[in-house]
Image: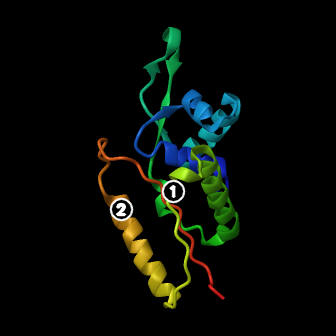
Amino acid sequence: MSSDLRLRMIRMTFDRPLTNKELAQRLGKDPATTLHHVRKLVAAGFLEAMPPRAGNRGAKEIPYRSTGLSWELDNSENVVAVGEAMLHAFLGEVADIGLRDVDQSRLVVTVDPEELKQRLASLMEELAAQPVRPEVPRVAIYLAVYPGD
């Protein structure tokens, strides 16, 4: 999963199915480009097609929803490519919403790195396991841990 565009598509569809046209509009991309990525994501099991619905002028539209598979992947073989895609996806999302809506923190701490990663992973897993509640706002999280030297 080394495409920032595909990572953004998975995030956008995690709790609400979107059509290829809707994804293209939100991403500012050509529908043919997003359709290529949608097909790849469906083939790999990251997105699933939902029942077709009627669009404008009766056209058949197929919404797609994230399967949640991306959260469970082991990316240890492609750590650099996946890391770059995640960073670029984050930067693209921040560019879309603007820095005023981003709550950021930055600090250096003295802590065992593995303990910190385990605690953060536990929190992320706990949050990811919560059921989707439509009345609660969606919040995106980007987290990076790196040497403080």
Name the residue located 41 percent from the left edge and 66 percent from the top edge: 124
Residue at screen point 52% across, 69% down: 105
Scheme by which the image is coloured: rainbow
Mark drawn on residue 70: 1
Q: Is residue 127 left or right of residue 118?
A: left
| Residue 111 drawn at (x, y percent) | 49, 90
Picture quadrant of residue 16: top left
Image-based side of 118 in relation to 33, left or right: left
Image point (49%, 17%), residue name: 55
Looking at the picture, tell me which residue is in the foreground, 39 or 58: 58
List x then y, in percent, for residue 25. Answer: 60, 31
Crowd tier of the residue under label 2, counting other residues whose Cα lies within 10 Å: few below 14, some 14–19, many 20 or above: few
Numbered label tally: 2
Q: Secondary structure at mark 2?
A: helix
Q: Amino acid at mark 1?
A: Ser
Q: Name the residue beneath numbered marker 2.
A: 127
Q: Label 2 is placed on what type of residue?
A: Leu
Q: x, y percentage for residue 108?
A: 56, 83
Quarter placement of the C terminus: bottom right
Distance in Å between CA atoms under marks 1 and 2: 15 Å
- The answer to which of 4 and 145 lies nearer the viewer is 145
* In-image side of 20 versus 88 (left or right): left
Q: Can residue 46 be spotted in the picture?
A: no
- Where is residue 61? Give x, y as percent: 51, 22
Element on which disc 1 rests: helix
Position of 69 relative to 53 (above/below): below
Quadrant (top left/top right/bottom left/bottom right) for the N terminus: bottom right
